[in-house]
Amino acid sequence: MSSITGQPRLVRARPARLLAPLRRLVDSVLPPRCLHCQAMVEGDGALCPDCWPLFDFLAPPLCEGCGFPFEYDPGPHDTVCGACHAHPPHFDRARSVLVYGENSRKLILDFKHGDRTWPAPAFGRWLARAGSDLIGGADIAVPVPLHRSRLYARRYNQASLLAMELGRATELEVEPELLTRHRPTPSQGRMSASARRRNVRGAFRLRRGFEEMVRGSRILLVDDVFTTGATAGECARTLKRAGAAAVDVLTLARVVRPRGE
Ligand SMILES: [Zn+2]
Ligand SMILES: [Zn+2]
């Protein structure tokens, strides 16, 4: 257009002038808010300066397998934690954005049960950043599914929402229907790691029609919280039995208990 008119500045100025009031109108209806305290912030999906320090963002050094944060860099030879040595997980690598603590717990519970889904795009961008190493090599992103009884009660699957937003932030293909949870599993609140593994054993299936897509693919599983890794591990086992070449896991938060608890 600018080459035809020969007046690029004028042509460019017009839409900007038209868009500015519209932008202000949108901003006045939906001002960007802090994800934690809902104070006004600059730009979408951020935390205000007061709330940043309330959240523990995970950073290296991490266990190469499960993403458990190491206090000290273990060096190039010992890159997996004791738990991954003792019980090598079915997934290849797991990474998370945040440590699951008091504040991240509230953020996630509101997102999961409170119909408070407006932070989803920001979560998608956080996931894209924390999972950049995994995303580069992934063919498709797949959310951990809910059983239909829970989906009915909650009306949406928070993991699907996160996967869709991750897809939007990265252009990674998302297949929300690929896995199904065909058996309802009791809430795992106070179960030990081994009880959790038994609880979810055999709970997932590949939906018919996706066999070809899974064979030889590198899959990125998406969920809200990584607790012991039992759920992600069982999904990974299901996908690998179906021929997936690799399964990595990306979650919004991760429980970090001192080891030995
Ligand atoms: Zn705040
Ligand atoms: Zn580990």
Image: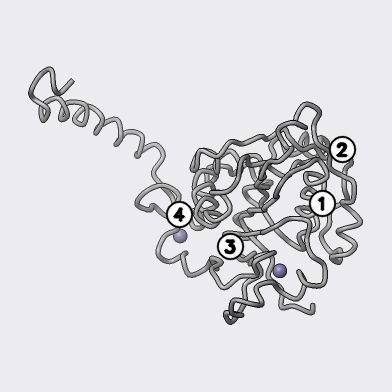
As measured in the structure, the alpha-carbon distance from the residue carrying label 2 to the one carrying label 3 is: 29 Å
Counting from the top left corner in percent of width and height, residue 206 is at 80, 36
SS for dot 3: strand
For marks 4 and 3 on the same chain, the one whose residue lies earlier in the sequence: 4
For marks 4 and 3, give the one nearer the viewer. Answer: 3
Residue 50, compared with residue 242, is above or below; it is below
- At 87% from the left edge and 37% from the top edge, which residue is drawn? 182
SS for dot 2: loop
For marks 3 and 1 on the same chain, the one whose residue lies earlier in the sequence: 3
- Some atom of ligand 1 lies within 8 Å of the CB belonging to the residue at label 4: yes
Residue 186: mark: none
For marks 1 and 2, give the one nearer the viewer. Answer: 1
For marks 2 and 4, give the one nearer the viewer. Answer: 2
Q: Could you tell me the amino acid type at mark 1?
A: Glu
Q: Residues within 10 Å of mark 3 (few under 14, many from 20)?
A: many
Residue 234: mark: 1
Residues marked 1 and 2 touching at CB (< 8 Å): no
For marks 3 and 1, give the one nearer the viewer. Answer: 1
**Residue with the mark numbered 2:** 182
- At 58% from the left edge and 53% from the top edge, which residue is drawn? 134
Counting from the top left corner in percent of width and height, residue 15 is at 21, 26
Residue 98: mark: 3
